Image (spheres, helix red, strand yellow):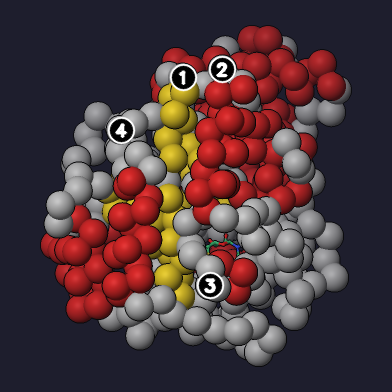
């Protein structure tokens, strides 16, 4: 295949995606990254959107094999923030000039439809802020109630588009169910985010190509491609973590294929490489998700080991990010950073 011609394609076959993900020569990889940066500039502009995360609970009823919050991990200290603490933290986020608040947790049914609706309502009362929920697979009635209460977006990664691998990584869960949840959330008018984990055991380049194509099929508003990092006290604690270069190539190819979608430069990437955040932003990403979970909770949201900025003051992290973003000539957006799709319900 002719690389220069391929990089200027408007659409891509699975074989072409595999070819790009398999590039080995430094010069060719740099061409891919440069093209992804141009496509990001064309569809998203120079702005980087910040999404302030609050990790409201680390209780989880699921047993995802790769995750430190899995039900069977009895080595972590579990916590739940109170609704008032959550609302107060959301205020800190908007006071920093960040107008998306992400409420994230394990699958924790303690936070039922009433409690989450109350929190959404309180956060939205006096501020024009977008709320993203990332609470795992919940029942359809809850999704409906939270949408009515004012939630705007839902983040639920498909993790892998390979049904066989999905079953191997998830206890008694099927990929088809996860996809049904995404369809339902979309039909309710949520802006939806999904994506994969890169570098999980048994995953192939073909699987990653299918992940990107699945994101395209769902016409996602946000697509996240995060590297797997082994987590202590999980069955995968001795497995090899993801390769940073493969993660960056995936983000770059995803930008070429998906075009007008929000792509985050993840904390996991910044954990694996001290310049990971900047590198991600230069390979197609246009979103960063700083963690605002207050002490003493933040160190207990141990999805994987040695998470970047885990022990830092959230406000210090936020100004450090600002510095990093400006140092590569980009600008922090002051908007809510809604979907880039024309047909999105805003
Ligand atoms: N429980 C919700 C869910 O699963 O969607 C939200 C919280 S969960 C911790 C958020 C994301 O963490 C998951 O979608 C998964 O991709 C990621 N994650 C879990 N374990 C990980 C690991 N060991 N390395 C990197 N990312 C991981
Ligand atoms: Fe729970 Fe989410 Fe971790 Fe799975 S990925 S164990 S659902 S917190």
Q: Is mark 1 within 8 Å of ligand 1?
A: no
Q: Secondary structure at mark 4?
A: loop
Specify which label sits upstream in the sequence, 1 or 4. 1
* 320 in relation to 189, above or below: above
Q: Are marks 1 and 2 in contact (CB under 8 Å)?
A: yes
Total marks placed: 4
What mark, if any, has residue 297 been given in the picture? 3
| Residue at screen point 68% across, 59% down | 307
Q: Which residue matches tag 4?
A: 335
Q: Which residue matches tag 2?
A: 329
In this rendered view, identify the residue nearer to me: 285 or 139.
285
> Can you tell which of label 1 and label 2 is closer to the viewer?
2
Percent coordinates x, y for residue 269 in the rendering: 68, 46
In this rendered view, identify the residue nearer to me: 231 or 55.
55
Specify which label sits upstream in the sequence, 3 or 2. 3
Q: Quadrant of the N terminus?
A: top right
Q: Estimate how packed mark 3 is, as few (under 14), some (14 to 19) or many (20 or more) residues with alpha carbons within 10 Å.
A: some
Q: What is the spatial separation of the Cα atoms under label 3 and label 2, in whole angstroms?
A: 34 Å
Q: What is the spatial separation of the Cα atoms under label 3 and label 1, in whole angstroms?
A: 34 Å
Q: Are marks 3 and 2 in contact (CB under 8 Å)?
A: no
Percent coordinates x, y for residue 175 in the rendering: 49, 66
Q: What is the spatial separation of the Cα atoms under label 1 and label 2, in whole angstroms?
A: 8 Å
In this rendered view, identify the residue nearer to me: 174 or 72.
72
């Amino acid at each position: 295949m002719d690389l220069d011609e391929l990089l200027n394609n408007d659409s891509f076959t699975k074989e072409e995606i595999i070819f790009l993900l398999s590039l080995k020569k430094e010069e060719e990889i740099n061409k891919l990254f440069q093209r992804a940066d141009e496509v990001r500039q064309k569809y998203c502009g120079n702005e980087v959107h910040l999404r302030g995360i609050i990790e409201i609970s680390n209780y989880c009823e699921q047993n995802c094999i790769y995750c430190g919050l899995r039900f069977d991990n009895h080595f972590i200290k579990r916590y739940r923030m109170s609704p008032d603490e959550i609302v107060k933290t959301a205020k800190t986020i908007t006071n920093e000039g960040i107008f998306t608040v992400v409420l994230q947790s394990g699958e924790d049914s303690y936070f039922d439809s009433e409690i989450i609706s109350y929190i959404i309502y309180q956060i939205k009362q006096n501020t024009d802020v977008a709320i993203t929920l990332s609470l795992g697979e919940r029942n359809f009635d809850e999704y409906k109630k939270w949408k009515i209460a004012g939630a705007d977006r839902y983040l639920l990664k498909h993790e892998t588009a390979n049904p066989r691998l999905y079953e191997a990584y998830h206890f008694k869960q099927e990929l088809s169910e996860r996809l049904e949840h995404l369809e339902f959330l979309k039909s309710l008018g949520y802006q939806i985010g999904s994506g994969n984990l890169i570098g999980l055991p048994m995953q192939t380049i073909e699987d990653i190509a299918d992940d990107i194509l699945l994101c395209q099929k769902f016409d996602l508003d946000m697509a996240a491609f995060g590297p797997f990092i082994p987590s202590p006290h999980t069955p995968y604690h001795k497995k090899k973590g993801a390769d940073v270069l493969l993660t960056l190539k995936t983000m770059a190819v995803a930008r070429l294929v998906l075009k007008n979608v929000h792509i985050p430069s993840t904390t996991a990437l910044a954990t694996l490489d001290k310049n990971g955040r900047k590198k991600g932003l230069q390979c197609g990403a246009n979103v960063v998700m700083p963690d605002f979970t207050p002490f003493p909770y933040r160190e207990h949201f141990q999805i994987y080991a040695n998470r970047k900025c885990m022990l830092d003051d959230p406000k210090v992290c936020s100004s450090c990010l600002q510095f990093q973003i400006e140092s590569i000539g980009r600008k922090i957006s002051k908007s809510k950073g809604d979907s880039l799709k024309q047909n999105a319900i805003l």
